[in-house]
Image (spheres, rainbow, N blue to C red):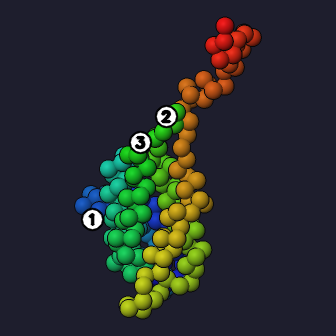
């Protein structure tokens, strides 16, 4: 990312801890040729993957990503972590009557992906800054955090039962007296 100046979305599954990385390392070898034409045996390069299928595991993976972005100098840990916290508050938030909670972690991942896609457009070519300059992704995250283009991925969905009740035709009241006049 820093070499090209273009932000790339990093999937949570790729944000493994060092312990997970060493446990999943395999000793598979690959045969390749070097520049002089000699055969060379080298270990296969595989990207380690971790599981991010539960709230806790996804949260830990996104926290590791926040730390990596801070170490790379493209965003402050606190800013990226505030964005992740914002996403997870939607899971815990009490919804109005008739609406489902955000329960699918895929909704959070899609919202996160959309935010980083839009941030990549805003920060195109300017990820490299001096040490005294503000980190480029911080401004983009702050601006996109409340954008409808991002928040549409966290919709409030109506309960199926409530939707069916609304779709039922109301029984017509028989014509009669109004306001209790006798």
Task: Confirm whether residue 78 shows in the render.
Answer: yes
Closest to the observer: 6 or 26? 6
Give the answer, above or below, for where 97 lies relative to 57: above
Task: Confirm whether residue 34 shows in the render.
Answer: no
Determine whether label 3 and label 2 are within 8 Å by CB: no
Relative placement, left or right, of 67 versus 134 is left
Instruction: Give the spatial CA distance, label 3 vs label 2.
Output: 9 Å
Residue 97: mark in rendering: 2
- Which residue does the image show at 43% across and 79% down from the upper left? 74
Tag 3 residue: 94
Q: What x and y, as percent, mark residue 49?
A: 38, 58
Q: Secondary structure at mark 1?
A: helix
Q: Secondary structure at mark 2?
A: loop
- Which residue does the image show at 39% across and 53% down from the upper left? 88
- Which residue does the image show at 33% across and 52% down from the upper left? 57
Q: What x and y, as percent, mark residue 48?
A: 37, 61
Q: What x and y, as percent, mark residue 65?
A: 38, 66
Q: Residue furthest left?
A: 19
Q: Nearest to the eye among marks 2 and 1: give it.
A: 2
Q: Nearest to the eye among marks 3 and 1: give it.
A: 3
- Which residue does the image show at 34% across and 72% down from the upper left? 77
Q: Secondary structure at mark 3?
A: loop
Q: Quadrant of residue 121?
A: bottom right
Q: Residue furthest right?
A: 175
CA neighbours of label 3 inside 10 A, class few (<14), some (14 to 19), many (20+): few
Closest to the observer: 148 or 175? 175
Tag 1 residue: 18
CA neighbours of label 1 inside 10 A, class few (<14), some (14 to 19), many (20+): few
Relative placement, left or right, of 106 versus 180 is left
Circle nearer the N terminus (3, 1):
1
């Amino acid at each position: 990312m820093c070499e090209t100046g273009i932000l790339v979305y990093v999937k949570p599954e790729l944000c493994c801890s060092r312990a997970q990385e060493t446990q999943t390392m395999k000793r598979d070898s690959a045969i390749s040729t070097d520049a002089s034409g000699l055969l060379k045996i080298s270990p296969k390069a595989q990207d380690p993957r971790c599981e991010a299928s539960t709230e806790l595991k996804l949260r830990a993976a996104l926290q590791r990503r926040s730390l990596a972005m801070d170490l790379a100098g493209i965003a402050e840990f606190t800013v990226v972590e505030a964005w992740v916290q914002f996403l997870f508050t939607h899971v815990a938030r009490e919804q109005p009557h008739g609406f489902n909670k955000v329960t699918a972690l895929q909704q959070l991942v899609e919202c996160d992906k959309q935010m980083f896609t839009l941030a990549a457009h805003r920060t195109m070519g300017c990820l490299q800054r001096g040490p005294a300059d503000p980190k480029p992704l911080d401004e983009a995250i702050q601006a996109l955090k409340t954008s409808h283009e991002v928040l549409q991925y966290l919709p409030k969905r109506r309960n199926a039962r409530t939707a069916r009740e609304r779709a039922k035709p109301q029984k017509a009241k028989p014509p009669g007296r109004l306001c209790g006049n006798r």
